[in-house]
Image (tube, rainbow, N blue to C red):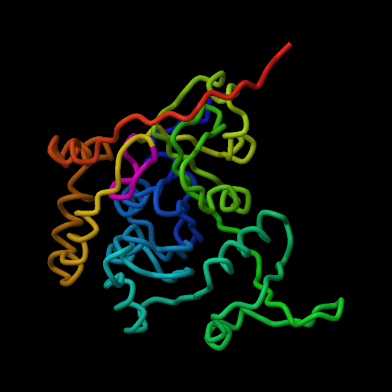
């Protein structure tokens, strides 16, 4: 039975006000289209969790979707601060929890494993322990030095963008692999957005690339170009010009409102968004094919 749904329908069905939402993806495959659709649906009081909030959470906080952020490293990559999230934190308008990168991944791994917490090595980020009571030290029961423990993170919904999936939710992704698998296995509900929907035979032809299996997926949405301004390895490049532009846009509430009105509320879906970007941007982000070598799985 197919799990294919329009993105707006999947998010309306599976994301409720007050939910903890994890938008996965590290550097690339960041599900911006889902973030924009959540803004259009006017979801409120969300807890936004993510290892690197990126611009997707700056925009969602600006739109009033969030009451709290859970994160490790917060910034406009290669540019500077996330102005909107930072201002909301400094003004006390947004609750927050901060971890190291590995702390966030360890939380997801604990959640995916069905454990209440997991240990990790001590890090250089000792100050985080002072500001976050969820980060604790416990004695090594085998007599070594103390270890850090962090609690499991089980998001209500994980949103994962992939290069291709079948209609049942078996998904391939490649390039930089972030925390997509851990987030999906830790979450109570999983929404996939995919550049391509392919026949199951394509997925079965390369089983080692199936990072997300259908049995943990609730909805599959065909959303080409879903991660702009981030990138999808093999499909389109990162839009560095937009990351620089957002730094200027986010300097004032008026320019942020104008951006949201024009590029989110003023559009129906990602297809209209991509068309509005225009052919000049499409050409700038176009990538040349670069194929891996064939793998012989061998069959009798």
Picture layout, residue 179 above or below residue 281: below
Q: Where is residue 253, by image quadrant?
A: bottom left
Q: Where is residue 12, by image quadrant?
A: top left
Q: Is residue 84 left or right of residue 115?
A: left
Number of marks: 0
Q: Nearer the viewer, residue 96 or 135?
A: 135
Instruction: Residue at 62% x, 21% y: name it.
Output: 296
Q: Where is residue 254, by image quadrant?
A: bottom left
229 in magenta: yes
Picture layout, residue 176 above or below residue 122: above
Q: Is residue 199 left or right of residue 141?
A: left
Picture layout, residue 57 above or below residue 190: below
The image position of residue 293, as x and y in percent, is 50, 27
Instruction: Residue at 73% x, 57% y: name it.
Output: 114
172 in magenta: no
The image position of residue 246, as x and y in percent, is 21, 61
Image quarter where the C terminus lies is top right
Instruction: Residue at 56% x, 58% y: name it.
Output: 155
Instruction: Residue at 43% x, 28% y: name it.
Output: 291
The image position of residue 140, as x and y in percent, is 80, 78
Q: Is residue 185 left or right of residue 84?
A: right
Main SS class of the magenta portion in the image: loop
Most distant residue in the right direction: 142
Q: Nearer the viewer, residue 275 or 144?
A: 144
Most distant residue in the top direction: 300
Image quarter where the N terminus lies is top right
Chain part drawn in magenta: 224-233
């Amino acid at each position: 039975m197919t799990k294919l749904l329009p993105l707006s329908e999947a998010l309306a069905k599976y994301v409720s006000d007050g939910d903890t939402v994890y938008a996965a993806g590290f550097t690339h495959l960041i599900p911006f289209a889902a973030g924009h659709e959540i803004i259009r649906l006017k979801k409120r009081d969300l807890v936004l969790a993510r290892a690197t909030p990126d611009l997707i959470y700056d925009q969602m906080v600006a739109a009033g979707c969030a009451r709290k952020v859970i994160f490790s490293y917060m910034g406009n990559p290669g540019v500077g601060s996330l102005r909107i999230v930072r201002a909301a934190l400094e003004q006390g308008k947004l609750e927050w929890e901060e971890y190291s990168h590995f702390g966030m991944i360890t939380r997801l791994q604990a959640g995916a494993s069905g454990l209440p917490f997991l240990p990790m090595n001590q890090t250089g980020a000792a100050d985080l322990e002072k500001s976050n009571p969820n980060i604790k030290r416990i004695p090594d029961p085998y007599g070594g030095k103390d270890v850090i423990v962090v609690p499991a993170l089980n998001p209500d919904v994980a949103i994962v963008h992939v290069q291709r999936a079948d209609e049942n939710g078996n998904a391939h992704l490649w390039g930089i692999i972030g925390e997509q698998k851990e987030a999906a296995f830790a979450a109570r509900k999983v929404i996939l957005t995919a550049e391509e929907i392919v026949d199951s035979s394509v997925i079965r032809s390369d089983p080692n690339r199936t990072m997300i299996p259908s049995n943990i997926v609730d909805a599959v949405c065909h959303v080409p170009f879903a991660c702009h301004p981030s990138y999808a390895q093999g499909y389109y490049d990162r839009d560095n010009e937009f990351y620089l532009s957002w730094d200027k846009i986010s300097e004032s509430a008026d320019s942020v409102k104008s951006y949201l009105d024009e590029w989110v509320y003023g559009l129906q879906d990602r297809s209209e968004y991509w068309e509005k970007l225009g052919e000049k941007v499409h050409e700038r982000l176009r990538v040349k094919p670069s194929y891996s070598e064939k793998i012989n799985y061998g069959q009798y």
